[in-house]
Image (cartoon, rainbow, N blue to C red):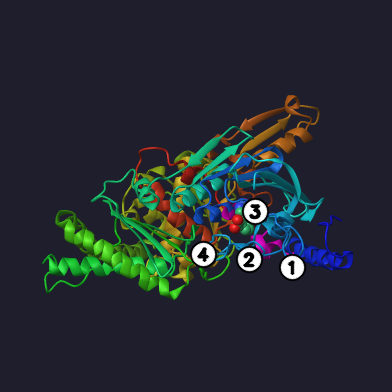
Amino acid sequence: MAKGGNGGAAAYAAKDIQVLEGLEAVRRRPGMYVGGTDVKALHHLVFEVVDNSVDEALAGACDRIQVILRKDGVVAVVDNGRGIPVDIHPEKKKPALEIVMTMLHAGGKFGGGSYKVSGGLHGVGVSAVNALSRWCEVEVRRDAKVYSQRYERGVPTGPVRAVGKAKAGETGTTVTFRFDEQIFKGELDYKFDTLATRFREMAFVTRGVTISLKDERDGQETSFYFEGGILSFVKYLNRNREVVHPVVAVNREVDGIGIEVAVQYTDAYNESVYSFANTINTVDGGTHLTGLRAALTRTINDYARKAGLLKESDPNFSGDDTREGLTAIVSIKHPDPQFESQTKVKLMNAEVQTLVQQVVAEGFGTFLEENPREARAIVEKCLTSARARDAAKKARDLVIRKSALESLTLPGKLADCSERDPGKAELYIVEGDSAGGSAKQGRDRHFQAILPLRGKIMNTERARLDKILGSNEIKSLVSALGTGIGEGFDMSGLRYGRVIIMTDADVDGSHIRTLLLTFFFRYMASLVEDGHLFIAQPPLYRIESKGRGASVRYTYSDPERDRVVKELGGPDKVSLQRYKGLGEMNPQQLWETTMDPANRTLLLVTVEDAAEADRTFDMLMGSAVPPRRDATCRRWPAAPRP
Ligand code: 0RA
């Protein structure tokens, strides 16, 4: 075992045991530290290291972070921060670098006083990444020297060593690690888009930092730098929308808490509001978001009254009225952020609500006072929204009442099954008439019903969900299910215990799936909660072996394809077909691969998945202009298999 070079041997042994125990705890219960051992947790490793580099940026000590995806699951994170300190810790008698890398939660003890990402939600420190890596190497550039140490499964393979000279004034840290396949099992690998999406967010909310991502597996590269911080973020979100006024941005520090807000109204119907705390995307909102919303509603009401745009007899605008078409970001930097829990990403610090509310009310109020034309446009938008909401409610009530009646008559396109016990019956919602045809022929008509939906329901871009609700496609779906919707939803009417969404594995397919999930999330939430909603998994490849005893195999991912091809004797021994859509499968193939309960894989949709779709929905519905790469190419989050 490595020795630092000073201190008694006995004392060292005791400390080493302590270190080993700490790392062992991480390896024994990775779920507690990185949330599991799946592909999501794998990405968490990278985020954990990058969080530490972003902390350096938040401390004003770093403006460049490079992430490199090497072959064979190796990741390198390079930053130009201060470099992890290497001096000997007075009590532990070891270099600080070794302590940071091998002791849990040791990272935070050195910084002090500044905002931290790594001290917040994730908070496990690079040592957890080290513990979960087959090997890890850290290089520190500091005091004109380059230091290095290597670890295997968290244990140093030697002391911290000065290995060379750094250029004058050059500082920084490089952490290179290969995840441990004993912990992260299965065919896991990093996804460029997942990483890029998070890095874009981090760059938006960390002014002045450049985060670049390079994928050496396929040469893909991207880099994020936003001069204007979250103001740029709002511009980016509204890039395809008609805006009502220039972005209103407020940037203040109160009581040691950094508060940044950017607001812009657009002609859209949806609200796109994102909140961050110490660069962490708080997807469940929290006190900072509540403060922002409350301030906007109050400020607009006050202004509208004062300017005579709301008459005495008019009621105040509701929160919903002031949120339509709103794009906003609130990003706070807090020395001691409190989150609801590890998984629910919600900010809980109570004092933040009042502070954000005050800062926004002041900044946005001033904007309204100083820009009467824009202020009027915003108020008028709220008025339209209030009226439309009223009308929409009436229309919706009508749809709900009507669909209750219509559920007596089943839609013409439905190919129903003969089974009447909902516990045994299944409904396949299939994209497109041609795939619908294959599914109708391939199914087991005893218990499988097919409802083909036309893709064009997605063309209702920018439409309120209320409008989509009025579409014939959705009406057919509601009456086939037999439950009614919204407040009129009644589970006892459900005609199929399994509702299965079956769409192509392409962009259109993912749009339709997102729309359907959004619909279920908003209008039939208990159907999702009770585990009735599934996503079918059609295969991506058909592999036929050419040799004697020819056989056919189907595979559902690229690594699986590679493995099967190898198993069957290599590329020369097989013929490979890639399915671009369900329509390319004949009814028999569709049955065998995707519908036969003996062979198929269904993904159970969780409420979290559906909520994620609801958020994505807004991004997809923005407009048709450029390809919205990140949102559409992301694979659906894998849900537990039933
Ligand atoms: C402990 C203390 C300080 C910085 C760091 C750790 C640090 C960790 C990582 C991980 C990746 N990059 C990093 N950069 C820095 C404070 C340093 C000081 O006060 O000089």
* Residue indicated by mark 1: 91
Q: Earlier in the sequence, mark 1 or mark 3?
A: 3
Quarter containing the N terminus: bottom right
Q: Are marks 3 and 4 in contact (CB under 8 Å)?
A: no
Q: Which residues are magenta?
A: 29-52
**In front of the other: label 1 or label 3?**
1
Marking on residue 38 = none
Marking on residue 345 = 4
* Residue indicated by mark 3: 84
Observer able to see residue 44 = no
Q: Residue 406's x, y, as percent?
A: 35, 61
Q: Are marks 1 and 3 in contact (CB under 8 Å)?
A: no
Q: Residue 72's x, y, as percent?
A: 71, 40
Of residues 387 and 469, the one nearer the viewer is 387
Image label count:
4
Q: Is residue 124 left or right of residue 459?
A: right
Q: CA distance from mark 2 to mark 1?
A: 13 Å
Q: Residues within 10 Å of mark 3 (few under 14, many from 20)?
A: many
* Residue indicated by mark 2: 109
Assign the magenta stretch its main secondary structure. Answer: helix
Pointer 3 residue Cβ closer than 8 Å to ligand 1: yes
Disc 2 element? helix
**In front of the other: label 2 or label 4?**
2
Pointer 2 residue Cβ closer than 8 Å to ligand 1: yes
Q: CA distance from mark 2 to mark 3?
A: 12 Å
Q: CA distance from mark 3 to mark 4?
A: 28 Å
Q: Residue 295's x, y, as percent?
A: 30, 68
Quadrant location of residue 371? bottom left
